[in-house]
Image: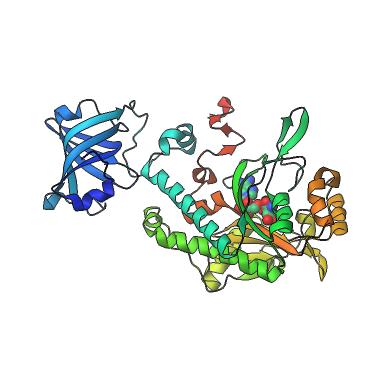
Amino acid sequence: MSKRTLIKNCIPEVGKEVIINGWVQTVRSHGKIAFLDVMDRSAIIQVVCTGEQLGDIRPQFVVSIIGIVANRPEKLINPNISTGGIELQANKINILSKAEELPFDMGSKDLNLQLPTLLDYRALTLKHPKVKMIFKIQSALVKEFRKAAEELECEEVFVSAIASGATEGGAEVFSIDYFGHRAFLTQSPQIYKQIMVGALERVFTIAKAYRAEPSVTTRHLTEATQMDIEMAFVTLEELLDSLEFVGVYMVKNVSEKYENILKEFNVEKPLISSTVPRLTLREAQAIITKRTGRNLSGELDLNPEDEKEICAWGKEEHQSDFVTITHFPTKKRAFYTMPDSNNPEYSLSYDLLFRGIEILSGSQRINEYEQLIESMKNKGVNPEKFNIYTMAFKYGMPPEGGFSFGLERLTMKLLDLQNIREASLFPRDMDRIDERLHPVHK
Ligand code: AMO
């Protein structure tokens, strides 16, 4: 017998010898006898050993243990964990890798660290069970996004993050030195996914978006992950149906599969109604004014407070954590957005809000070449910088549109995290690229 048994698979092995591999979480030494909690990717188990076997083993040591699986005495059963009825009686403990003394307690249920410390020690804090759960949820969201995109018959494409121009707006763009030329990190996969619908009709992509956000907020990163879909031969209605389908699909499936994690984070099951309430921006503003008395008639967008208020309305009136907002003013949206032919001051654009925050935006696009060039010029975007893009419209682009979900925002809201940085493995912001950039801010 030399094969490793995953900890979760030890449960039916009572009376048998197994080998487990994993990380020591906690050590409780009572002199002659000691207890270790050992964790692998599947579960955690209590290991009983002698003081001698324990030696200088500390939390985070990587061990391989040969032992006999035994039932725990009745009164020592832990009903809170899947392996709470068993323990492993160690015959031999092999140390595969040592770990230094931890700078803080990693053994408690919650890591009670300030955000900067949590991020300063990211390689370590990512090993905490509760932090790992965040990224399990994130991974599940991506899997469900892919499945939903496939249901919509989209092909997955991979596009570049280096471009010769800025797409989403001038100021918030990182420029890079590209062999002596000025290039930019893409603010979204927008132009490439649009080009690709000209070729494949329906595409999806999961891409990094780079935004030189000059402000520090709890909902902005300078590098975010976007889950994008773009589809040809669709109307605004069909686009709205599609984005609501994908949003509900992800949130519903992930929260059902990982009910235990949602409980661990003390968050309620998401409220999903049979149809997502849809409002135009102006309708939403009128509702907010009615509820709060605030006059929003001059406002061209919803601010964070408005997003919270309209989501409170969605919850109360429609039992829905999602609200779709459509028809934002054309001048507030990017050059590729199609104005509404009934009233070109407004556009065929939309945002999806979830639990008080925008998690998606998108639009039907301008697909007619001349109109696109004019819109680019009006928005101060030089079409010559985007020949590869405009070419796609010169040579037959059908009516089309799409949308983009922010992965970290969705993760944050599903688990009710206070700061988007907690939902990014290695968050980038004004003050940090792994290390803090401005030690004076410490
Ligand atoms: P937009 O800029 O609204 O639209 O981005 C789409 C979604 O991506 C997420 N997001 C961010 N998350 C964290 N930090 C940021 N700095 C950040 N910026 C964006 C949000 C947002 O709703 N190309 C269009 C989409 C389209 O039209 O298809 C776009 O990028 O959740």
* Residue 117 or residue 130, whichever sits in front: 130
Q: Is residue 287 left or right of residue 66?
A: right
Residue 205 drawn at (x, y percent): 62, 52
In the image, 214 versus 64, the foreground residue is: 64
Query: Is residue 245 in sight in this rendering?
Result: yes
Using the image as rendered, state which of residue 128 and residue 67 is in the foreground. 67
The residue most toward the front is 1
Is 438 positioned to the left or the right of 346 in the image? left
Q: Residue at x 55, y 39 (%)?
A: 427
Q: Is residue 126 left or right of residue 90?
A: right
Height in image: 425 above or below 247?
A: above
> In screen coordinates, is 270 left or right of 359?
left
The answer to whether residue 289 shows anywhere in this view is no
Location of the N terminus (image quadrant): top left
> Residue 193: x percent and y percent?
69, 53
Place of residue 96 in the rendered image (x, y in percent of width and height, measured from the top left): 30, 29
Vertical arrangement, residue 16 with respect to residue 177, above or below: below
Task: Answer with the quarter of the image where residue 429 lies.
Answer: top right
Quadrant in the picture for residue 20: top left
- Location of residue 401 with respect to 66 vertically, above or below: below
Q: Residue at x 85, y 57 (%)?
A: 369
Residue at horizontal 75 percent and vertical 43 percent from the top = 166
Total numbered circles:
0
Protein image colouring: rainbow
Rendered location of residue 304, percent (x, y): 62, 54
